[in-house]
Image (spheres, helix red, strand yellow):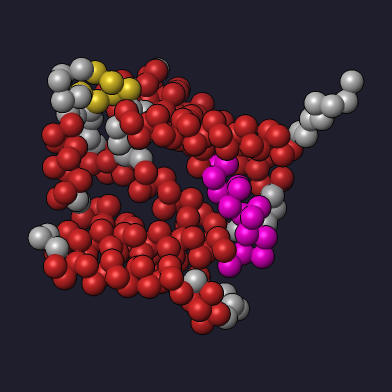
């Protein structure tokens, strides 16, 4: 049964990507970098694919977050380096981008300095590198010719993948779609790290899908 569910999900995802590519042919290979970054930093897909981790309680989840794991670390580092390579190859005035967003880069510089007086300096620096990677991925989208459409379709694919996998995990792979809370209760998590994260994912997805519906199918409530 699980094999059939996985096969159907893959076919469904392939059909969606093909349809999305027809709607937005400019979705280049570069945009898969921020999409993968979003998926790997906001879900438990790395744990499922490489660590074979099943449902675990909140204390173990917190401990795993603090300690981290080499697979996640090196995967995100590789994506960050690929993103930097993409930015360097783009014919864009990087100095202009930095000057026009001076306060943002000043904030990133300050957060790097703050690691110097942190109680956990090594963890702080690792987290800063991860946050810096988020900035790189954002710039990959910004440097696209039609960055607004590029951002929309990155989020569209992200929402589709996360919602589909969350339903599949909860319905067919309960050891992946559930976790144990601090009081021993069994809660839904889907692909999210926790129940609250799943709630935020559903809220953002609902807002995005509602906005897209209004954008693509405008309705005048004053026409009778």
Horizontal and vertical percent for residue 129? 29, 64
Q: For the point 35% across and 68% down, which residue is it?
A: 108
Query: Residue 185 or 47: which is nearer the viewer?
Result: 185
Quick check: is 148 in the magenta stretch? Answer: yes
Q: Horizontal placement of 190 versus 158: left or right?
A: left
Q: Nearer the viewer, residue 218 or 38?
A: 218
Q: Residue furthest left?
A: 119
Q: Position of residue 203 (x, y in %)?
A: 48, 31
Q: Quadrant of residue 166?
A: top left
Task: Choose between 16 and 158: the one closer to the eye.
Answer: 158
Q: Which residue does the image show at 66% across and 52% down from the upper left?
A: 149
Q: Which residues are magenta?
A: 143-157
Q: Residue furthest front?
A: 222
Q: Is residue 94 visible?
A: no
Q: What secondary structure do most residues of the magenta stretch adopt?
A: helix
Please state if 34 lies on the left or on the right of 58 as rendered: right
Residue 49, picture quadrant: top left
Residue 167 place in picture, x, y as percent: 44, 24
- Residue 145 visible to an observer of this rendering: yes
Total marks in image: 0
**Quadrant into which the N terminus falls:** top left
Quarter of the C terminus within the rendering: top right
Task: Examine the rendered structure and indicate whether residue 169 appears above or below residue 81.
Answer: above
Residue 176 in the image: x percent, y percent?
Answer: 30, 27
- Magenta span has 144? yes
């Amino acid at each position: 049964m699980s094999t059939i569910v996985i096969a159907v999900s893959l076919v469904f995802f392939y059909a969606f990507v093909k349809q999305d590519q027809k709607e937005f042919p400019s979705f280049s290979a570069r945009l898969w970098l921020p999409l993968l970054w979003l998926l790997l930093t906001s879900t438990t897909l790395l744990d499922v694919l490489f660590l074979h981790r099943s449902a675990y309680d909140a204390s173990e989840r917190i401990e795993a977050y603090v300690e981290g794991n080499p697979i996640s670390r090196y995967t995100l580092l590789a994506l960050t380096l690929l993103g930097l390579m993409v930015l360097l190859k783009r014919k864009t005035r990087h100095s202009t981008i930095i000057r026009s967003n001076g306060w943002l880069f000043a904030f990133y510089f300050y957060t790097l300095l703050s690691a110097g007086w942190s109680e956990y300096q090594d963890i702080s620096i690792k987290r800063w590198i991860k946050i810096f990677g988020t900035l790189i991925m954002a710039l990959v989208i910004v440097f696209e010719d039609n960055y607004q459409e590029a951002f929309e379709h990155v989020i569209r694919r992200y929402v589709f993948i996360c919602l589909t996998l969350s339903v599949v995990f909860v319905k067919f792979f309960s050891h992946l779609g559930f976790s144990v809370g601090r009081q021993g209760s069994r809660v839904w998590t889907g692909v999210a790290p926790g129940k609250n994260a799943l709630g935020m994912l559903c809220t953002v997805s609902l807002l995005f899908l509602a906005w897209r519906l209004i954008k693509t199918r405008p309705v005048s409530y004053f026409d009778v």
